[in-house]
Image (spheres, coloured by chain):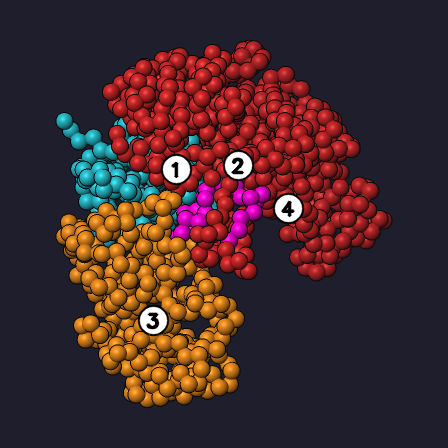
Chain colours: A red, B orange, C cyan
């Protein structure tokens, strides 16, 4: 016999509107072992919590059922409440009558009936719950940050400044990310490099940061507080301990590769640093374009290197790093717009993608900051096309959030650097941000022409060879526009990195349909993920501008700190165990466990589970033919009882 | 095909040799029963026992069933017809027995008989193979040239049934069950101790021989044997009320083979299909 | 009165249960016949849970897990896929209507898919009518 208390929350009208809460509480009091049942406006409020605590004492409750919102919202809150009142926290059951009942129906009869069934199931299950004790583990105080763009840099610096040791892992040969490609930043028009490069340098100099460029995460093991991460250092063919960054090698190198940093607008050497302010300031050899690797002869770089830093024998190496928490800040790509043939990218040389234009403006870029097109001419008329692939049901439904603003910035810079007419083709201008609307107004003043309409097609001009015709419907005048221009700038959708799904898999992160990482809660836990101890920041979560990215990075650093600033932490106690008396020695558990938690004791002829490795999925329990494995908190008896309870009403 | 009498002689000869040389501690084969029609599973542990060994058309027991009675390291010679050899492979996959402990005495055979019905045991009630899949020595010549009939052919009639008709068929069959558990006793793969049905925590089903408990017992047992049943048909021959359990097992085996691309007990290196997966398994299997 | 089926849902904590929450958060309405049991992973589902649910009177059973490849426990749902497929074949060969048991991969971001699946499945079960084959009629026969 147990003594159950049932607490039904109204959640204001959120629940009470479509469930008759007092009827539900009355119903609860008729259920087996229920000694007290109440309803209250807000169970999660202080008076609500006190009501539960008092009833536990007064009615000597040994089980508590809170009938309220999703357990993903308040399970933790109420566990603490009952624990404070002297009950083991695992004797709490949450019945989700908000997200899964009151919010998904408008019919109070249906809602009340379903809530009753769910509550009945919970009572059946609660009677069979057992107290569990949490495991206490040591916490590693170091943090890994994956991705060396502005988000990763910011998070790493924040953490390092608190005294924590940080590993910053970047797959390129330099940190800086996309921000290092930009010329100016909206709306203040301050120079991107001027604000970013001091931070890049601070990373390099910081005694608490281990910078790992040209590295990739290859394996993640362990769990919150104790991650074991294998890092692959890709072969650079340059010994960075010896290299003194004189860069003599890059001058002599005959090999030519695509300059990724300049968005492929020009070529770079096979041995190279991506851009002049790269950090670290030491080159790597791009094997695919190196004459020696291609033809077996050359080695010019080796000859000019006074420090004998060139090492063609170098191979990828692996390091294992232990950390307590991880911040994933892997950033974004721009959508490849070639498949959108109507815009002519890749077909007409006059069509540019946004990042290419950033490089044209940049004094360290391929044109040294002069706006000249692929044919060397300065454009006389420029069309900037918004929402290419984004806000588009056929491609990406999301708004990329920054394109309106950078398109305005482009307009300003075109005006500054050329005498061209600049046209914006937009759906609507989204200028929500500090100083953004003001910036928009300023650009309007600068004689930039705004045409509200999504461009249907970019075509070659038949009258003026080399010129382009932009075709769109101006939705304000309702007229069809055919505008001759020299240059077309596309603002493509921001999308996750091509390997975001792989990163997600490594770190056990869910992704949305486009591959952006899912946060634990869209509002209340935007930086945490479903994987305890792993946080996300920046555009890998969703498109955002630099200020928001930096704010997220700071937030993620603080979140990571809440873990690694503890010496010990409690882990969920919901692991599996073996009842050796029932084990038939089939070893199914050993065969299926992804974590190697069960092992077979050949001497005793039974399986044993290492609870430190168990993550509580329960797979072993369901493949165990003799029910010898007990998945704590989700035992066969508990699940069966719940099913029975649910099916009774 | 080698004459059964000749196989019996070879069995005795090999058993004697293996025991004499100390190569094995026990020979699992068939011994005399109360009449010729009822031979019994027999474990010869001494040379004196060898004379009691027999082999005839009624020797249809799956001797793999008895392997697990001996601890690892016990050297065992076992008489194995086709289905028995598959059971051995399956048990090796499941690490219940070790290949190195076994001397498999293969018996190619067709025309074994069901002593209850006197019917020939063919692909309708068993796996349809004539030769052992694995053996160390052969007690008769391998059989070739016999027509191979798919063990799943017999299912066509039942698959063609309307679901209502099929439900009525199985309901009637399972309602007959007296819960004697002869099926699991005869099954070489039913080595669980305790069996789920005997447990009280949780109590998966009613233990009384009534419809709901019977249904739960049989359906769950089919799942436990999915990808593991090697279609020897012993369960059905053991059943005192003649429930055609082999039909259900065959159906599950057929589905598993189609979905997972492997049949139970065919390769030592396979993993049992239900504790394995392939990333490229299709979602179609759920349709 | 029209037939209101009882449908058991078993949803994994990380994807489908969270997806169901999202359906709620975005106020997507769907029929209220589904009662969801939360488990940590779809691989926790013992086939006997499903047999038992039908015995206890479920007119349909809907299992929800993460998309293959996205399992919170890496490979749990890949085992679940095989085990549940076999469960389905067994039920079908016993003579149960195939449409009464369904497995769907619904991610944490697919609140709309959750609502759609529930809508569709409920309609399908209504069409099939009450499940009487496995259901235990007399209460005392329940284990």
User: The residue marked by circle 2 belongs to what chain?
Assistant: A
Residue density around tag 4, few if under 14, some if 14–19, many if 20 or more, within 10 Å: some
User: The residue marked by circle 1 belongs to what chain?
Assistant: A
User: The residue marked by circle 4 belongs to what chain?
Assistant: A
Residue A253 in view: yes
Foreground tag (1 vs 4): 1
Question: Would you name the residue on which mark 4 appears?
Answer: A230
Please check the rendered image and state whether residue A622 is part of the magenta-colored stretch, yes or no.
Answer: yes
Name the N-terminal-most of marks 1 and 4: 4
Discs 3 and 1 share one subunit? no
Q: Which mark is residue A638?
A: 1
Discs 2 and 1 share one subunit? yes
Q: Secondary structure at mark 3?
A: loop
Q: Position of residue A480 (x, y in %)?
A: 37, 22
- The residues colored magenta run A607-631
- How far is mark 3 from mark 2, CA to CA? 45 Å
Residue at 45% x, 44% y is A630
Question: Would you name the residue on which mark 3 appears?
Answer: B62
Q: Which mark is residue A104?
A: none
Q: Position of residue A520 (x, y in %)?
A: 50, 29
Q: Position of residue C35 (x, y in %)?
A: 31, 32
Q: Secondary structure at mark 4?
A: strand
Left or right position of C10 against B212: right
Left or right position of C140 against A392: left
Name the N-terminal-most of marks 2 and 4: 4
Q: Which mark is residue A573?
A: 2
Discs 2 and 4 share one subunit? yes
Pick the residue in front: A84 or A145: A84
Residue density around tag 3, few if under 14, some if 14–19, many if 20 or more, within 10 Å: many
Residue density around tag 2, few if under 14, some if 14–19, many if 20 or more, within 10 Å: some
């Amino acid at each position: 016999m147990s003594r159950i208390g049932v607490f039904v929350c109204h959640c204001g009208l959120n629940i009470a509107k479509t469930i008759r809460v007092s009827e539900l509480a009355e119903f609860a009091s008729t259920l087996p072992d229920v000694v007290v049942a109440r309803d209250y406006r807000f169970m999660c409020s202080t008076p609500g919590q006190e009501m539960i605590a008092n009833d536990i004492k007064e009615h000597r409750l040994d089980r508590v059922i809170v009938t309220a919102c999703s357990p993903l919202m308040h399970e933790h809150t109420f566990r603490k409440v009952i624990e404070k009142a002297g009950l083991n926290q695992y004797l709490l059951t949450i019945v989700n009558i908000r997200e899964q009942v009151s919010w998904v129906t408008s019919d109070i009869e249906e809602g009340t009936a379903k809530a009753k069934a769910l509550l009945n199931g919970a009572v059946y299950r609660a009677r069979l719950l057992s107290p569990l004790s949490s495991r206490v583990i040591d916490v590693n105080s170091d943090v890994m940050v994956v991705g060396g763009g502005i988000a990763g840099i910011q998070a790493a610096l924040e953490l390092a400044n608190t005294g924590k040791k940080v590993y910053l892992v970047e797959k390129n040969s330099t940190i800086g990310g996309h921000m290092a490609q930009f010329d100016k930043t909206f709306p203040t028009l301050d120079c991107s490099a001027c604000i970013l490069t001091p931070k890049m340098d601070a990373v390099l100099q910081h005694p608490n940061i281990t910078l790992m460029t040209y590295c990739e995460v290859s394996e993640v093991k362990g769990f919150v507080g104790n991650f074991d991460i294998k890092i692959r250092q890709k072969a650079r063919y340059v010994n960075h301990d010896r290299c003194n960054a004189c860069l003599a090698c890059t001058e002599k190198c005959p090999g030519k590769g695509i300059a990724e940093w300049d968005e492929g607008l020009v070529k770079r050497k096979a041995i190279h640093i991506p851009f002049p302010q790269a950090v670290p300031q030491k080159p790597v050899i791009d094997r695919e374009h190196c004459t020696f690797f291609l033809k077996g002869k050359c080695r010019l770089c080796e000859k000019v290197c006074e420090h004998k830093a060139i090492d063609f024998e170098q191979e990828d190496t692996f390091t294992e790093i232990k950390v307590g928490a991880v911040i994933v800040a892997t950033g974004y790509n721009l959508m490849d717009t070639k498949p959108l043939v109507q815009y002519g990218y890749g077909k007409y040389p006059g069509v540019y993608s946004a990042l290419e234009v950033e490089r044209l403006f940049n004094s360290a870029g391929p044109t040294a900051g002069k706006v000249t097109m692929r044919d060397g001419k300065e454009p006389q008329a420029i069309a900037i096309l918004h929402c290419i692939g984004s806000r588009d049901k056929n491609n990406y439904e999301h708004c990329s959030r920054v394109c309106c603003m950078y398109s305005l910035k482009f307009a300003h810079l075109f005006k500054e650097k050329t005498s061209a007419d600049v046209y914006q083709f937009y759906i609507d201008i989204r200028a929500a941000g500090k100083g953004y609307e003001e910036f928009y107004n300023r650009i309007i003043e600068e004689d930039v022409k705004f045409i509200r309409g999504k461009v249907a097609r970019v075509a070659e001009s038949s009258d003026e060879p080399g010129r382009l015709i932009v075709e769109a419907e101006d939705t304000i005048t309702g007229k069809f526009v055919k505008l001759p221009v020299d240059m077309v700038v596309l603002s493509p959708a921001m999308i996750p990195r091509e390997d975001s799904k792989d990163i997600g898999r490594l770190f056990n992160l869910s992704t949305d349909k486009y591959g952006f990482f899912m946060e634990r809660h869209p509002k209340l836990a935007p930086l945490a993920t479903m994987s305890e101890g792993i946080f996300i920041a920046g555009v890998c979560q969703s498109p955002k501008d630099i200020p928001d990215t930096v704010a997220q990075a700071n937030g993620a650093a603080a979140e990571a700190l809440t873990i690694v600033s503890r010496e010990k932490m409690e882990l969920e106690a919901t692991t599996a165990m073996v009842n050796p008396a029932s084990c038939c020695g089939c070893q199914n558990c050993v065969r299926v466990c992804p974590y190697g938690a069960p092992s077979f004791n050949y001497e005793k002829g039974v399986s044993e589970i290492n609870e430190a490795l168990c993550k509580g999925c329960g797979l072993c329990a369901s493949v165990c033919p003799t029910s010898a494995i007990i998945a704590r908190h989700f035992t066969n008896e508990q699940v069966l009882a719940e099913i029975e309870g649910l099916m009774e009403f | 095909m080698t004459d059964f009498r000749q196989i019996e002689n070879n069995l005795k000869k090999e058993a004697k040799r293996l025991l004499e040389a100390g190569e094995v501690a026990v020979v699992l084969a068939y011994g005399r029963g109360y009449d010729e029609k009822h031979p019994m599973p027999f474990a010869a542990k001494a040379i004196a026992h060898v004379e009691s060994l027999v082999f005839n058309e009624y020797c249809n027991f799956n001797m793999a069933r008895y392997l697990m009675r001996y601890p690892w390291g016990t050297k065992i010679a076992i008489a194995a017809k086709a289905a028995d050899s598959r059971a051995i492979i399956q048990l090796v996959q499941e690490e219940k027995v070790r290949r190195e402990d076994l001397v498999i005495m293969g018996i190619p055979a067709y025309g074994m008989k069901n002593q209850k019905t006197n019917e020939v045991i063919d692909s309708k009630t068993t796996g349809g193979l004539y030769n052992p899949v694995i053996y160390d020595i052969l007690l008769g010549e391998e059989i070739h040239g016999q027509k191979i009939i798919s063990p799943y052919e017999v299912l066509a009639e039942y698959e063609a049934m309307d679901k209502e008709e099929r439900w009525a068929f199985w309901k009637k069959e399972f309602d007959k069950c007296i819960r004697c558990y002869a099926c699991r006793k005869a099954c070489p793969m039913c080595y669980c101790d305790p069996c789920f049905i005997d447990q009280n925590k949780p109590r998966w089903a009613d233990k009384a021989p009534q419809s709901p408990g019977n249904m739960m017992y049989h359906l769950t047992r089919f799942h436990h044997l999915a990808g593991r049943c090697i279609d020897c048909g012993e369960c059905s021959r053991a059943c005192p009320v003649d429930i055609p359990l082999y039909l259900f097992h065959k159906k599950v085996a057929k589905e598993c083979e189609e979905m997972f691309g492997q049949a139970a007990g065919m390769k030592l290196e396979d993993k049992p299909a239900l504790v394995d997966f392939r990333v490229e398994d299709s979602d179609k299997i759920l349709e | 009165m029209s037939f209101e089926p009882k449908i058991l849902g078993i949803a994994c904590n990380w994807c489908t249960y969270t997806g169901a929450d999202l359906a709620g958060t975005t106020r997507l309405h769907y029929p209220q016949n589904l009662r969801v049991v939360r488990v940590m992973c779809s691989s926790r589902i013992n086939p006997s849970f499903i047999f038992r649910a039908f015995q206890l009177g479920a007119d349909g059973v809907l299992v929800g897990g993460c998309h293959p490849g996205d399992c919170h426990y890496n490979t749990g749902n890949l085992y679940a896929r095989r085990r549940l497929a076999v469960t389905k074949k067994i039920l079908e060969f016993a003579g149960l209507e195939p449409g009464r048991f369904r497995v769907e991969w619904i991610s944490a971001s697919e609140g709309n898919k959750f609502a759609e699946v529930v809508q569709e499945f409920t309609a399908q079960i209504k069409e099939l009518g009450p499940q009487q084959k496995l259901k235990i009629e007399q209460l005392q026969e329940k284990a």
